[in-house]
Image: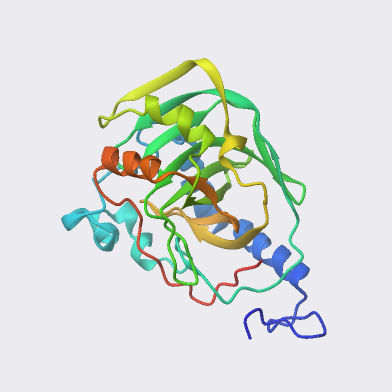
Amino acid sequence: MENGVGNSGENFWGANPRELYLSINSNIFQQEKGMKKTVIGSVCAGLLMAGTAFASGHGAQWGYTGHKAAEYWGDLSPAYAICKKGLNQSPIDITNTIEANLPPLVFQYNTSTVDMIDNGHTVQVNYAPGSTLTVDGHTFQLIQFHFHTPSENAVDGNLYPMEAHLVHADAEGHLAVVAVFFEEGASNPLLDKLWPNMPTKVGETTTLADMSYDVNEMLPRDHSYYHFNGSLTTPPCSQGVYWFVLKTPATGSRAQFQKFHDVIGSDNNRPLQLRNARPVLR
């Protein structure tokens, strides 16, 4: 039974999908509350830095190949221990989802001047303040977005050529990530504008102040999504992160995917993590 929902509208946890949604999100705020405020707060403070904990990490050096690859992250530093011990790690294979009446994602993204940073692990695009995501009355501010190739999350075991992570934070420092898959097709209009200015050396920053950029141009029209509780996909792998993975992929050209891969120099996706009985709502 794919979604675990019977005729009564209840799932195998004994709650209706709406109650399950609220329970999942309540748990994000309650689990490891004291520790999470410290960890997530420090992550948010660094989101705009080239060495952000979300896209590049603090402390011990890590990477995607050799003895610093993902399977070793949890041993590189005590600060990264949750990378191997955490039970709610990301990314995951999205399968056996539960049907639920999920609230819509309300994007209020403004145009913005941007800074693009090659932090050695991805290309990160810092966005000016004022753009928000609201879900069920809870508002998060868009901080930055960055890319992984191939995708980190999978759907029924299938990866996409590329995935963007739009990283948001609320006033209390809780993180929400909107993940956008890319499939090969028409070139993406936002990437058409960003890619010619992509920094090509580690530590290099390109400030694009000559015009404004609209992240809406990167999104598919359909904003329906999968939802689960997860973690950062890079060290320190902190948990308690809202994940909203758009079901419909955006498009990008093979040349756009290849240029990003050439700049990064290797695949930069963390392997799939154990789901550990976490519900994934759709």
Q: Relative to the observer, which residue lies in front, 32 or 61? A: 61
Position of the N terminus, as image quadrant, is bottom right
Q: Residue at x 58, y 24 (%)?
A: 112
123 on left or right of 95: left
- Left-right relation of 250 to 157: right
Towards the viewer: 4 or 16: 4
Q: Position of residue 59 (x, y in %)?
A: 28, 43
Position of residue 136 measured from the top left corner of the image (x, y, whole percent): 76, 52
Give whichever of 32, 191 is nearer the camera.
191
Residue 31 drawn above or below residue 210: below
Q: From the image, which quarter does the C terminus lie in? A: bottom right
Q: Name the residue: 65% across, 68% down.
A: 281
Q: What x and y, as percent, mark residue 205?
A: 35, 24
Q: Residue furthest right?
A: 8
Q: Which residue is outermost to the left? A: 67
Residue furthest top in the image = 210
In this orientation, does residue 54 appear? no
> Is residue 236 rendered to the left or right of residue 245?
left
